[in-house]
Image (spheres, helix red, strand yellow):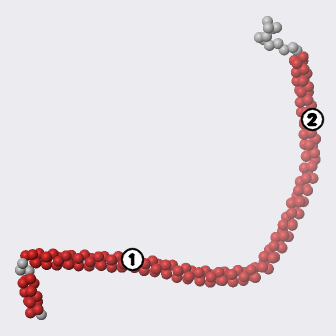
Amino acid sequence: MKEALGRLIELVYAATKTAKVRKRLMGIVAALVILQLYFVRELIAAELLFGIGFSVILVLAGILYLVGAIAEQGWDLTEAGARVIARSARRSYSKLSPVIGALAERGWDLTEAGARVIARSARRSYNKLSPIIGALTVQGWELAEARTRAFARSARRGYNKLEEVSKRQFRHPRSESAR
């Protein structure tokens, strides 16, 4: 290996003895090295960008999968809960229907009895208050009649005075006949 490397160095040294060849060779080598470094950097950058993009897609897919799995589990639990509630409601209804019927019948009876009590009380109150109401009605009628008479009297007086005033001839204070 050392011999091959030594021969390569001698060959390069012999070829670069002239300045013109040396400058061209160094320019080509420098361009290759720069291009190689730039290309490698671009490949590394592209690989990093693709890696970041794929990791974001992986995270989003994982989140969506978890949400879907949780929703599916929740739907199953909701369905089971609805079945339990329906079963419980059916049992409760079958056990409570006689009680509810008896309560409704008892409530109807109590309502009917309460209505009878209220009607009886109203009849008693009316019987006790009817003479008072009658007297108040008669007295109120008399007061209304007296007020109507007074109003009619006042209207007649006002009409008579208005008639007297309207028969007099009107003269304006600035008119020529009044001067």
Query: In the displayed structure, does residue 25 sit left or right of residue 142?
Result: left
In front of the other: 43 or 155: 43
Query: In the displayed structure, does residue 107 sit left or right of residue 148?
Result: left
Marks 2,1: beta carbons within 8 A: no
Q: Amino acid at mark 1?
A: Gly
In front of the other: 154 or 121: 154
Query: In the displayed structure, does residue 121 sit left or right of residue 76?
Result: right
Residue shown at 91%/46% (left/top)?
Answer: 133
**What is the quadrant of the C terminus in the image?**
top right
Compared with residue 155, is residue 136 higher up or lower down, i.e. above or below? below
Q: Is residue 27 visible?
A: yes
Q: Which mark is residue 145?
A: 2
Quadrant in which residue 17 is drawn: bottom left
- Secondary element under disc 2, as helix, strand or loop, is helix
Q: Amino acid at mark 2?
A: Glu
**What is the quadrant of the N terminus in the image?**
bottom left
Residue shown at 16%/78% (left/top)?
Answer: 29
